[in-house]
Amino acid sequence: MLNRIVHGTETEKPPLVIAHGLFGSGRNWGVIARRLSDTRQVIAVDMRNHGDSAWTGSHTYPEMAADLAEVMADLGRPADLLGHSMGGKASMMMALSQPGNLRRLVVADIAPVAYSHTQLPYIQAMRAVDLSAITRRSDAEAQLAAQGVERALQSFFTQSLDLTGKRWKLNLEALERNMPAIMTFPETEATWDGPTLFLTGAESNYVRPEHREIIRARFLRPRFARIPGAGHWLHADRPREFEAAVRTFLDA
């Protein structure tokens, strides 16, 4: 089962499971998870090949959906699911293939479509870091900066750095090999009729107007909302606004 970081205790409200995006971890969602856990239990998972979850040779959305379905089933009660980017695709796939006790779904800044922008340059940049020469995260950030990685991503990537073990807590080899699968979305005729919020950053171009027809064909009760001033990492750009939108939808 995926590694889980549990925030808060069980309440009368359904628990919330959070699935992070590519190169992330459950730890990245600590601030949002802690704030939302004031009224419900929140479980932030490490997706396969990330954080403290198992490393596997394959990294497909049907497999990630099965991972999430296992976590949801283990809760033993109706639960909500929030997924960002890659985690959003995995969450959509779970809703379409193994909804089980899924109650409500929040998809953060991603659509069920194939994308053309590859993340391989970031994998190459992380691989190029001389881990034997680092004693703190700022050392790795400096090496990433020298390769042209922007400041915000330097900090984001190094959150997945094991300083003591001098290794990345990311299976970079598997992620590189499976990048074509990560960029796409499985062909399916399945639909889900549960409430779904597609929450996007107003400054992001990941979810376009033309994607709405595709979304509506698969998710029969969609709602759409945008957060002004936020990009693809909308939960980090505008955390209070993101939290408020998620809370309002889950409590509706």
Image (cartoon, rainbow, N blue to C red):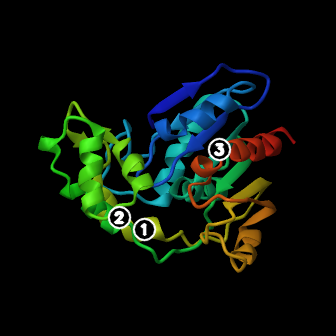
- The amino acid sitting under disc 2 is Asn
Q: Nearer the viewer, mark 2 or mark 3?
A: 3
Q: Residues within 10 Å of mark 1 (few under 14, many from 20)?
A: some
Say whether residue 179 is left or right of residue 78.
left
Amino acid type indicated by mark 3? Pro
Residue 251 appearing in the image: yes
Which residue is depicted at the point 22% across and 41% down?
167
Dot 2 crowding, Cα within 10 Å, few <14, some 14–19, many 20+: some
SS at mark 2 in the image: loop
Check if mark 2's residue and mark 3's residue have beta carbons within 8 Å: no
Q: Quadrant of the N terminus?
A: top left
**Amino acid found under the numbered disc labelled 1:** Ala
- Which label sits on residue 239? 3
Q: Which residue is mark 1?
A: 181
The secondary element bearing badge 1 is classed as helix
State which tag comes first along the sequence, 1 or 3. 1
Instruction: Decide if residue 185 is on the left or right side of residue 157.
Output: right
- The percent position of residue 47, horizontal first and vertical second, equals 45, 45
**Which mark identifies residue 178?**
2
Is residue 97 left or right of 120 when viewed as pictured? right
Residue 98 higher or lower than 136, as above or below: below
Image coordinates of residue 196 in percent, x first then y, are 76, 55
Q: Is residue 129 above or below residue 191?
A: above
Q: Residue at x 64, y 46 (%)?
A: 82
* C-beta proximity under 8 Å, tags 2 and 1: yes
Image quarter (top left, top right, bottom left or bottom right) of the C terminus: top right
